Image (tube, rainbow, N blue to C red):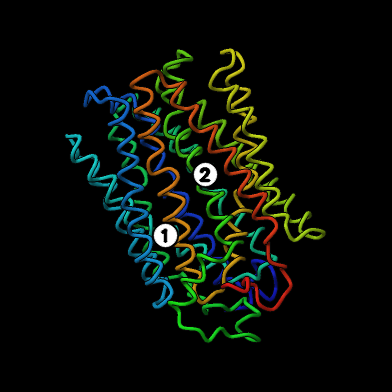
Amino acid sequence: MSTLAQSDGLRARPVLITFLLLLGLSLLNYIDRYLLPGTQPLVQSEFHLSDEKLGALTTALFVTYMLTAPLTGWLGDRFRRKPLIVAGATLWSLTTLFTFSVHSYGSLYFRHALVGVGEATFGIFAPAVLSDFFPARARNRILSIFYLTIPLGAALGYLLGGQLGARFGWRAPFLIGAIPGLLLALAYALLGVEPERGASEIVLRTHIDSRPQRQQMLALLSNPAYMLATLGMAMMVFTMGGISAWMPTFLYRFSGMSVATAGTVLGAITVVDGLAGTWFGGWLAERWLRTNPRALYLLSAWSVLLTLPLAALVFFGPAGWSLPALLAAEFCLFLNTGPLNAAVCNSVSASVRSSALALNLFLIHMLGDTFSPQIIGAISDHSNLRIGLAATLATLVVSAALLFRGARHAPPLDRPDLDSPAC
């Protein structure tokens, strides 16, 4: 199973198939997540919802997502991850099918909450599996490729939600990911391979951590490389979650766009920025790492800092500048997708990586996008959506500060034990 890590490329056919299946599942996962923002004005009109109650739908998904994450992380460090991935993908695909029969706000709220349970499994196990295929130096490149599914899935979610929702009603778009999701889950069950845990880690061959796993988990909290990357990501996710949930509605209200047009425009911007920004960020970090082991943190910090004035221009600038500023802001923000996730994976050992990723997801959603859409909606109800979105600017400042601090604790990529002394 370590052939791929040894060759540092996707040459082993079973691993290539596994990687492609994980890419497909991840793409459908993010399409499903961003269908709601693309159809929000239609949902709001049918159920007569305030902005706060509309934002609470996204909150429901992430509450169950983050509450499920610790359990799935514990399972992932003790049992085979392949059946857990299949179970999670099957659950959110079936739940997506259920959406077509939803005719009340309570049922829609329950649907979003249940999707979070399924997503929590996939979001934790897929990066852990890929980390077992690839050594530390290669993870930035591989995870940058893997996380291209975020902007591509988001763009397709916005586009399909807006276009299909305007034509066939808001329920129709939710059907597009259900059947493909079930088919990919079946394909992964039949064709996916399970890597040996820690197969790419020098640490497991030369320095086996004999401490009980509970002690290793507690040590995560005193691992500055891990915690600062996680908290910096959480503050960034607060911003990204809020903007991604409300930007189609922002364009609908303040730019005079129809639901379909807003979804199409935002989808186009997201796919261009996401693909270009994620690729360029991974490429730049790959080269910067040759001379500076702190590159993953530093690039992430600078990308967040550069986003700040551009986001402010989107919210409060002249209407003619909003789309160009949004294009530039999203590009900057996507630069850190691969590098920051690679920094989190590199900061912990393989023996607790699933649990560490679970804790990471719990914290970034608890402090980030679980409540940001609802908070922004509540502020909007009492003022306007521009003021609500301005709350995301403060978290960008905090994120950059945490990541610059985290760069001081970045572990050298070539040392036998990638963990900090505390972990």
Q: Nearer the viewer, residue 109 or 393?
A: 393
Q: Nearer the viewer, residue 65 or 382?
A: 382
In the rendering, at what x and y percent does residue 227 appear?
Answer: 55, 59
Q: How many marks?
A: 2
Q: Nearer the viewer, residue 178 or 125?
A: 125
Numbered circle sitting on residue 235 = 2
In the rendering, at what x and y percent does residue 207 appear?
Answer: 63, 85
Identify residue for label 1.
Answer: 122
Q: Secondary structure at mark 1?
A: helix
Quadrant including the C terminus: bottom right
- Quadrant in the rendering for residue 191: bottom left
Residue at position x 36%, y 68% in the image: 84
Residue found farthest to the front: 222
Quadrant including the N terminus: bottom right
Counting residues from the start of the chain, the first of labels 2 and 1 encountered is 1
Residue at position x 66%, y 77% in the image: 417
In the rendering, at what x and y percent does residue 109 appear?
Answer: 24, 41
- Quadrant in the rendering for residue 137: bottom right
Q: Is residue 69 left or right of residue 8?
A: left
Is residue 326 shown above or below 214? above
Q: Name the kind of residue labelled 1 in the image.
A: Phe
